[in-house]
Each structure stands twice: as structure tokens, then as C-alpha cells.
Amino acid sequence: MIGRLAQIKSRRDVLLAVLAITAASVVLSVGLAAWATTGQDAADRRDIMVIAAKISALVSSIMSYGVVDAIRAIVKMKDSVERLARTDDLTGLDNRRAFLTDAAGEILRAERHGEALALLIVDLDYFKRVNDAHGHRVGDLVLVAVAEVISRSVREGVDIVGRLGGEEFAVLLARCDEDRALRAAESIRALIEAMRVPTPAGEIVMTASVGCAPIVAGDCISAALQKADEALYAAKRGGRNQVAACAKANGGSDPRERTDRQRREPAARPPLKRSA
């Protein structure tokens, strides 16, 4: 019973449930009244059935208020549980599981429509030093600030942002080719570098390395993650605080070549704006 009630998701469903309960109560009462008065004349049976129907309707109305409250509580609890299961507790972004699920669905959708996609992995440089020097509470403040910066840098309702774990974040850029993805990645990197996080330990300054991978036909989310991860390691090896694309062997450009070109073209790196 609880499982069926938990499937109710709209006011229309609630109304239909109440009407069904009321109708069932009326039918039951009328049937019992008719059965109990078998053998009496028609007028008496009719009067008793009318009285039984009125009583049933009154009882059903009273019960409906309790049923509606119970259904609403179940729906609210179910929505809360689902939201908690998808959300990273600290940053409020999608957690790893939710991000991978949503990204996999977006990849399938984009492939059907022939749209370009790109995946970014953003990893904070030397973040462990913040935790070691100032404690995890300060580190958490930094992570929250970075999550807010990334969220403001992408298109709401279009791109997908998640925290993969620790100091690593992921962004799936919808309807976005490699050049645009690199500009978006560089914008995120620059915003993180410019960020000043006020903490009890003073202002914290961070930098980030970003791996960028275009998603091509046939790529699944795990393949895209691998390519973006390889690009991220190229950015780390290149000195950190930079953007790198996946290597040519994986269908992209050379990381140093693309990163150098991005740095030579500052005018081509406007941040992505949140859509209205």
C-alpha cells in the first residue's frame, strides 16, 4: 500500500486517489444496505440506501483529509530521499553517481540529434596542503566556493556539473565543440585562480588544472572520463594551473599546443553566462 501511494507524484493523482476511496466507500455501503434489507418493500430499501450513501460520503470526506495529508507526506519524503541520494552533501552539486547517470543520458540524447558534447574534469592544485595546513573545515569552505564558481560559469539547465569526489569536479558541456569547450575550461580555470576564499585562517587562493575531452560518436561516459582524465594529467605534468585537451591518439589535439594557443588568445575566452 505504501509503495503504491509513493508512486503518486501530482495533485491530480491525489484527487483521483481520494475520489477512488470515496467511490469505493459509497459502493460498499450501498451494497451492504441493499443486502441487509432484502425482503423489505422497495420504498424502505430505497430510503435505507440513501441514508447509507450519505453516511458513506460523510465518512469518506472525513477520511480523505487524512489520506491527502498522508499522501503528501509520502510524496514529500520520497522527493527528499531522491534529492539526497543525488546530491553531494557539501557542495549541493550532483554527486558522482548522479552526474554519471545524467551525463550518460545526455550523451545518448546528443548522439540521436547529432550534437557536439565535451567533458571537463577540474582538479584543484595542491588542495591537500590546504587541509593539512588549515584543517578540513577550511578545505570544505574552499570546495564550496569552487563549486559556486563552476556553477555560475555554465549554462543553467543545459550543462551538467557534478563533484566526482575530493577536490575533483566534472562538467558536461552540451551542444559544445572542442574549441568552445576549451574556452569554457580556460574561463573556469581563470575564475578559480582569481577567487579569494575568506576563511578563519585568512584568504585562501587556489588554482586548478582542467582536462578537456570532446565526446565523439560511440563514446560512453566511461570512455569520455578516461580521455578527460588523461588530459587532466597532461595539464598536471605541464606545470598545473592550465587547461589541456586529450592527446591526438584519443582523437583530440596535442595538449601543449592547444593550451599555448588558448593562452595566446585571451580575447577569445569569454566566460559562459548563465542562461536567463
Image (tube, grey):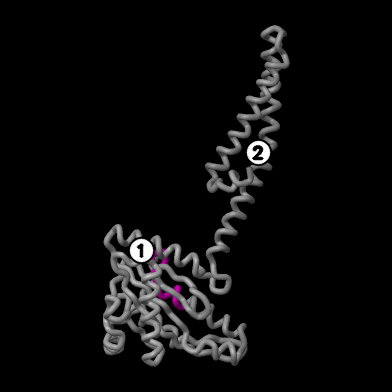
Q: Is residue 187 visible?
A: no
Q: Where residue 180 is drawn, which disc sits there? A: none
The residue lying toward the viewer, choosing from 209 and 10, is: 209
Label 2–label 1 contact, CB within 8 A: no
Q: Is residue 87 above or below residue 153?
A: above
- Circle count: 2
Residue drawn at the location 60% of the way across and 45% of the way down:
5
Residue drawn at the location 37% of the way across and 73% of the way down:
119
Q: Position of residue 59 (x, y in %)?
A: 70, 32
Q: In this image, 22 relative to 172: left or right?
A: right
Residue drawn at the location 50% of the way across and 80% of the way down:
167
The stretch drawn in magenta includes residue 152: yes
Q: Where residue 64 is drawn, which disc sits there? A: 2
Q: Which residue is mark 1?
A: 107
The residue lying toward the viewer, choosing from 100 and 209, is: 100
- Location of the N terminus by quadrant is top right
* Viewer-nearest of discs 2 and 1: 1
Amino acid at pointer 2: Ser
The residue tagged with tag 1: helix, strand or loop?
helix
Amino acid at pointer 1: Ile
- Location of the C terminus by quadrant is bottom left
Instruction: Give the farthest residue toward the front.
Output: 249
Q: Position of residue 65 (x, y in %)?
A: 67, 41
Question: Which residues lie in the magenta part?
Answer: 149-158
Q: Residues within 10 Å of mark 2 (few under 14, many from 20)?
A: some
Dot placed on the residue nearer the N-terminal end, 2 or 1: 2
Give the quarter of the image for residue 49: top right
Q: Position of residue 33 (x, y in %)?
A: 70, 19
Q: Position of residue 244 (x, y in %)?
A: 34, 83
Q: Is residue 120 visible?
A: yes
Q: Residues within 10 Å of mark 1 (few under 14, many from 20)?
A: many
